[in-house]
Image (cartoon, rainbow, N blue to C red):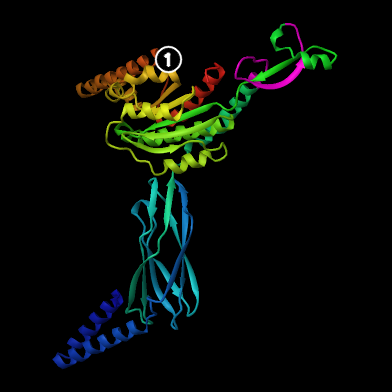
Amino acid sequence: MVVTGRAALVALLATLAALAFRTTAGLLLVDAAIAVVIGTDAVLAGSVRKLGISRSGDTRIRLGQQGAVELTVTNPGRRVLRGVLRDAWQPSLHAGGPAKLAVPPGGRVTVTTTLAPARRGDKSAGPVTVRSLGPLGLAGRQGSRVVPWTVRVLPPFLSRRHLPEKLAMLRLLDGQHRSVIRGQGSEFDSLREYVVGDDVRSIDWRSSAKASDVMVRTWRPERDRRIVIVLDTGRTSAGRVAGVPRLDAAMDAALLLAALAARAGDRIDMLAIDRQVRARIVGASRTEVLARLTDAMAVLDPELTESNGDLIAATLLTTARQRCLVVLLTDLNSAALEVGLLPRIGLLTARYQLLVAATADPRLTELSSARTDPAAAYQAAAAERASAERARIAGVLAQSGVTVVDAPPDQLAPALADAYLSLKVAGRL
């Protein structure tokens, strides 16, 4: 049995009235009457044990958006159930407070809980608590029940707004490359009449014999190139830049690249690695790869350990045995890269076209320019040193044949997409 604040208020007022008689018998009589009224009110409350409770609604919600989970409450009893219902969720989902409940005998009511997640990952529902009050609202019955439900909070994909612009650039690039391109590994596009300047090796003699003019073959770049996206989930990915975790910025950039490459006809695989392989998406079709990447990224969290460079290299070599584009999303942290990627850089660049993308901290530029007092001067010196160290690591990677993208969180995704398109233009994919 539960007692409400209304019951306490009634008891207080009745006790004060009884004290006016200044007799112990009167006080005991009033207290007994109050107890009887409260007990009767609790007995008349609808039963919560026989309630039927089921869930339905969203199982996936993008971070920054809202979703809804519905609870259907069925009352098989003979009394109206009036009270409140609390659907418990993790605080990061901002599920709100209790909802009023009124279920007629033999009826059912649906209660909607709006979820506004603030963190990625799988979020499980807590117990559902129903408090049934009597007709007077003084007391009632209460019970809790576990009604299982899990909501997966997906990455927000904020860089989706850049996709139309990048697709337009891709179409322009594809139109340029549909001209005469010849060589091993390119796809046949169409036949056209020979013009002065065409490579005679592209003449199709069989088609020319059937036609009244000399015909040449035109080619287009292969559309089934492979891209392997590697997310470094080690300790450097836990750092926040402009309020955004490096891992989240890397995920956003990876999603834009995957969406663009899928439209270009390329195959996309994804690995998430630190000291073990956290996620592996291989062989997904172009129509489902974005959904599978988003689903796998939702449950990834940074590990506060240094990533294993040998594991990254070995996993890549076993996953992609032929030359392809490898996009490593990590940080240009000298301490981490000098024991992780750099000792294996020669092995990787010999096999793959390697692109390293990192999240730059715009605050370094701000600190470098602020030298108004001695403390600011020391901060500026530290910022200049950090920037110089990042530039040094980027230079070492570039000398090894690695394409490097270093951009702030809000610019990393479009910068990575531009680097991908530039590699296509240069014919390096």
Q: Is residue 195 left or right of residue 372?
A: right
Please give the name of the residue rendered at 51% of the width and 42% of the height, measured from the top-left corner: 291
Residue at 53% across, 34% down: 259
Q: Position of residue 353 (x, y in %)?
A: 46, 20
Q: Which image quadrant: the N terminus?
A: bottom left
Q: Is residue 270 above or below residue 375?
A: below
- Please state the horizontal and vertical placement of residue 16, each as a whole percent of the image: 20, 83
Residue 386 or 272: which is nearer the viewer?
272
In the image: residue 351, left or right of residue 185? left
Q: Where does the image place residue 170, in percent across and percent down from the top left?
A: 59, 26
- Any magenta on residue 194? yes
Q: Quadrant of residue 350?
A: top left
Q: Is residue 266 visible?
A: yes
Residue 23 is at least partly visible in this image: no
Does the stretch in magenta take in 30? no
Pick out the residue farthest to the top. 197
What residue occupies the far right of the structure in this picture?
A: 212
Secondary element under disc 1, as helix, strand or loop, is: loop
The region drawn magenta spans 175-196
46 vs 414, left or right, is: left
Please state the total of marks drawn on the protein image. 1
Q: Where does the image place residue 198, in percent across and percent down from the top left?
A: 71, 9
Seen as rendered, the residue at the extreme bottom is 25
Q: Return the residue nearer the eye: 241 or 189.
A: 189
For disc 1, the marked residue is 401
The residue nearer to you, when weighing 313 against 296, is 313
- The quadrant in which residue 408 appears is top left
Amino acid type shown at disc 1: Gly
In this image, 199 relative to 313: left or right?
right
